Image (tube, helix red, strand yellow):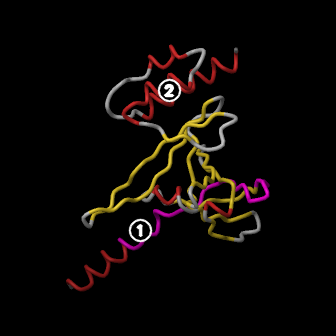
Amino acid sequence: MKKYTYLILFALFCGTVKAQVTFTVGYLINAKGDTLQGEVKINPKKDIDNYSKIFFKDANNIQKNYKPNKVKGYGFNGRHFVSYTEKDESMFCERLTSGAIILYKSSFEAGSAGETTKELIYYLYKDGDKKLTEVKESKFKKQIMEWMSGSAGLANDYEDGKKFNEASAIEIINKYNEWKSQN
């Protein structure tokens, strides 16, 4: 009887694990710059995969796995990712804001002493830049004041602290982008 109980629990567990990975409506921007509509395979339990690869099913039901160096970007559920290469290392960066200043986020796994942790890196970008600028998380307020020339006072709304606050950073950059589009 015990054997059957374990077998049933194992089958339920496998069904639960499989149910976590799903396809959702999305798009892919191929290397030529064409936007293809289709579905993106996502795993809500392992969001870090969104920054290293994309599994895309096009309108013809052709499924393919893409690395960041093979496409320009992709998106799903209001999230937008762009491909970025620096020092021969390719990754996807999630675009968190749009406008004069763009805030990007990337994620990777780092390991030390036998443990892996999820690390986040934030980048800033504005038109004319040749590459992304890494956010100095402990000095973000000072950094963003330099980027918001003409309206650096908006940076005072950022909740200053020793730890970077993504939500507050998005809020002040969006305020600046709105101000910039009107001036």
- Quadrant of res 56: bottom right
- Residue 150 is a magenta residue: no
- Residue 21 is a magenta residue: yes
Which residue is drawn at the image coordinates 56% and 46% (left, top)? 94
Labels 2 & 1 near each other (Cβ < 8 A): no
Q: Nearer the viewer, mark 2 or mark 1?
A: 2
Q: Residues within 10 Å of mark 1 (few under 14, many from 20)?
A: few
Measure the C-alpha gap from mark 2 to mark 1.
Answer: 42 Å
Asked if residue 29 is positioned above or below residue 160 in the image, the reply reads below
Circle 1: element type? helix
Residue at mark 2: 144
Circle 2: element type? helix
In this rendering, position of residue 57 left or right of residue 134: right
Q: Which residues are magenta?
A: 13-35
Q: Position of residue 139 (x, y in %)?
A: 40, 30
Residue at mark 1: 17
Q: Amino acid at mark 1?
A: Val
In this rendering, position of residue 70 left or right of residue 7: right
Which residue is drawn at the image coordinates 76% and 53% (left, top)? 35
Asked if residue 83 is positioned above or below residue 115 in the image, the reply reads above
Q: Position of residue 162 (x, y in %)?
A: 31, 31
Residue 163 or residue 96, whichever sits in front: 163
- Quadrant in which the N terminus appears: bottom left
Which residue is drawn at the image coordinates 56% and 22% (left, top)? 148
Q: Position of residue 179 (x, y in %)?
A: 63, 17
Q: Amino acid at mark 2?
A: Ile
